[in-house]
Amino acid sequence: MVTQASTYLFRASKGRFYFRNVSILVPMAWKSKSEYLTPKRESYDQADVIVADPYLKYGDDPYTLQYGQCGDPGQYIHFTPKFLTENLSMYGPRGRVFVHEWAHLRWGVFDEYNTDRPFYMSGKKTVEATRCSLSITGKNVVHTCQGGSCVTRVCRRGGRTLYEPKCKFMPNKDQKARDSIMFMQNLSSVVEFCTEETHNKEAPNLQNKMCDRRSTWDVIKESADFRKATPMTGTEAPPRPTFALLKSKRRVVCLVLDKSGSMDSEDRLIRMNQAAELYLTQIVEKETMVGLVTFDNNAKIQNSLEIIANNGYQKIIANLPQKASGGTSICKGLEAGFQAISSSGQSTSGSEIVLLTDGEDKNINSCFEEVNLSGAIIHTIALGPSAARELETLSDMTGGLRFYANKDVSGLIDAFSRLSSMSGDISQQALQLESKALNATGREWVRGTVPVDSTIGNDTFFVVTWEEQKPQIILQDPKGNTYETSDFKDNELNIRSARLQIPGIAETGTWTYSLFNTNTKSQLLTVTVTTRARSPTRPPVIATAHMSQSTAQKDSPMIIYARVSQGFLPVLGANVTAIIEAEGGHQVTLELRDNGAGADTVKNDGIYTRYFVDDRGNGRHSLKVRAQARKNTARLSLRQQNKSLYLPGYVDNGKIILNPPRPEIQEAAEATVEDFRRLTSGGSFTVSGAPPDGDHAQRFPPCKIRDLEAEFIGGLVHLTWTAPGKVLDTGRARSYVIRMSQFFQEDFSNAALVTTSGLIPKEAGLKETFKFKPETLSIGRGTVLYFVIQARNEAGLTSDVSNIAQAVNFIAPDSISALGPDISAICLTIWGLTVFFFF
């Protein structure tokens, strides 16, 4: 597949790109072979391609997890074993499929078909299949079977859908069209991406919606890859790719923790130890090898590598630092970390270091070369506003995660909780159900609840921390069984922490906790709850989060992304909120949306997003996301976006040749999701160029409206869209500008204005509806109108022009039984975890 794809890509890119080196990482459980090499920084989480069975039998469509803006890289390509091992000809040759998906992943282009709107009315008043390019020819047909007899006929016109619902576009097998790969790579003639000359700008597809009607080749030409590439001349085929087989190894982690004098302030040493103990006891996988290094001016190996299973973590917890003193030498800490790993007979390459510090080190750059040569992955945790600014560089250069924690311990706990294995084995990963800081006044009860769904409950811990005095604790399970203060085990190092491990599997349902502040003064109490999957065969719901950029630039808004999924399937209908904390302690809480508007690419794809513009100063910010579902509102989506098109059949010499039908999707009942709660850290990011007063209205306009729709109903035009904000997708815009035309055009600046008096914008995220009669135009049967909309804020900034919406005053559906003779059909009957990296 990859070798074929390399040649196909080379031709499609006009001699610029091919695959040179490919690393294939096989699971640790596979039997060892002499040709298996040791991975360096390759991991499941960093893979370009994942090979794994689907969750539920929703099919074997190859797809790319892609939810960024136009030109943004995707997350990964997912192939199922069945796709790779069986002859699924309806997708076309596997190498071609791979190039289709690679373009999603690498260059952030989108599909040029649309299964929801397979047909549209063109500017020439003809009904066209949604495709690119228009040079691809075929027939629009319906195939029906009854009692073993099958008939294929030309589609009937069908009102607002243009054709009847079961109508399919069947391409001719023999084509002259050379493009486009993002429409039908399965056609043998298709060897190119659509260009400016061949691109169909009218088609209602995601490429036009997300990329302002630019062709896929134009987007690829703007990529960093293209800018650095020159065509290879004098050759028709690239060199063959070289392949390396790698086998996952046992996870190796070394904690490198700061115990310098500054760690004595604001209880930082205590809070670091509380979070580190939680990580060792509850988060890190049981077979992991873990070491401990502490540093100030110098560094000391407190523990060489210990296997966490069989209480190995207790030896490490016993050596957590109890006293803070001295200066800060980050490089000496890292060097000792490398030594702790290598002295235990392990390679630093592919091993992980968790570096936590609150201080600066003017000599930190001196060990960057050694860090690079080590092959280790460095995760950094910046504690407080004075931590070295070079920490992010260490994470970025090694592929590690980066975190920022401020004053309360929950930020540190969130960071450590995110540091689970990158092996892809979700059954071994710890899931965070609660992480809450509660400010309890003297002699006061504080309470909360934690839902435990039936996919989790293994290895469940409740942890309580305090500042001054241990509170009284009451925990009640869903059956009314009660755990009290005496059931919670105190830490022997007096780090103001008590934990309870629930015996066996935690009961499914709502758990209730109550904490009584026995102190007469207020104190901060925290509650953390972690658990693991109940069964290795049934994946739990998980949430992951990140920012679109690691550093916010002046004119480039940041986007928050949160993905909620079960197995590989999106979870819809969840309530997802982001909590962002700045260095100064200012917190912003934002509700994330999966509505296909604002920053959100596709509605109902399980990716919840929002622009972040409420920064109150420059510097580091931390991101935490809470995803939950209540009252049975969540469900699984059995549809994946950004995938290779399943070709139902094709026309060969006037005959319809049918591919096997798509597998039936399972019952909707199997796609329900129980009530759940998940918390996850999205790491840290840096803001620069923030306005001093926090007002962004003069900096960013309302966001572009991407979901404008138009329809004729009873002589009126009905327009609907999602309201943008005063600033991007936050607040309320001041006014709308709507323009219309009888002709499709790219520039609507001179198109007729629609009177919008009385149209007052709603709060961002709400649905807008506007009805009017186009008095200045003569409207008859078959009239086609095009509309665009813009929003304006109080500072006079105007959003980009929206998507172009089309309204057709439909002719009544045909009443003839068929529009042509039956077409003879040939029915065909067919009987019937690995990852890749590309460089």
Image: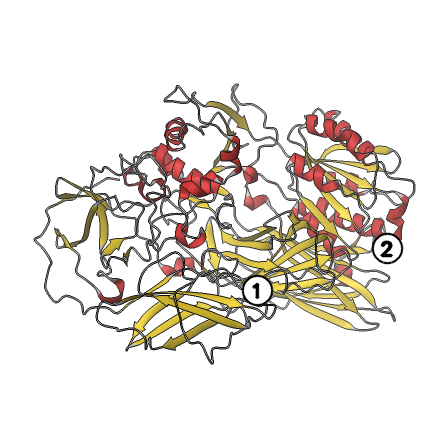
325 displayed left or right of 179: right
Percent x, y for residue 639?
Answer: 39, 53
Q: Does 136 appear above or below 304?
A: below
Q: Is residue 356 visible?
A: yes
Q: What residue is rendered at 86% in x and 68% in y?
A: 519
In this view of the protein, which residue sits in the foreground, 100 or 302?
A: 100
In this view of the protein, which residue sits in the foreground, 60 or 601?
A: 601
Mark 2 or 1 closer to N-term? 2
Q: What residue is rendered at 51% in x and 26% in y?
A: 31
Percent x, y for residue 379?
Answer: 69, 40
Residue 128 sits in quarter = bottom left
Percent x, y for residue 63?
Answer: 41, 44
In this view of the protein, which residue sits in the foreground, 158 or 773?
A: 773
- Residue 797 image label: 1
Instruction: Name the image quarter holding the N terminus.
Output: top left
Q: Is residue 508 visible?
A: no
366 displayed left or right of 818: right
Q: Residue furthest front?
A: 750
| Other-residue count near label 2 (Cα within 10 Å), few / some / many at <14 / 14–19 / ≥20 | few
Identify the amino acid type marked 1: Leu
In this view of the protein, which residue sits in the foreground, 554 or 559?
A: 554
Q: How is the image coloured?
A: secondary structure
Identify the amino acid type marked 2: Glu
Residue 453 sits in quarter = bottom right
- Residue 266 image label: 2
Percent x, y for residue 701?
Answer: 57, 62
Which structural element holds mark 1? loop
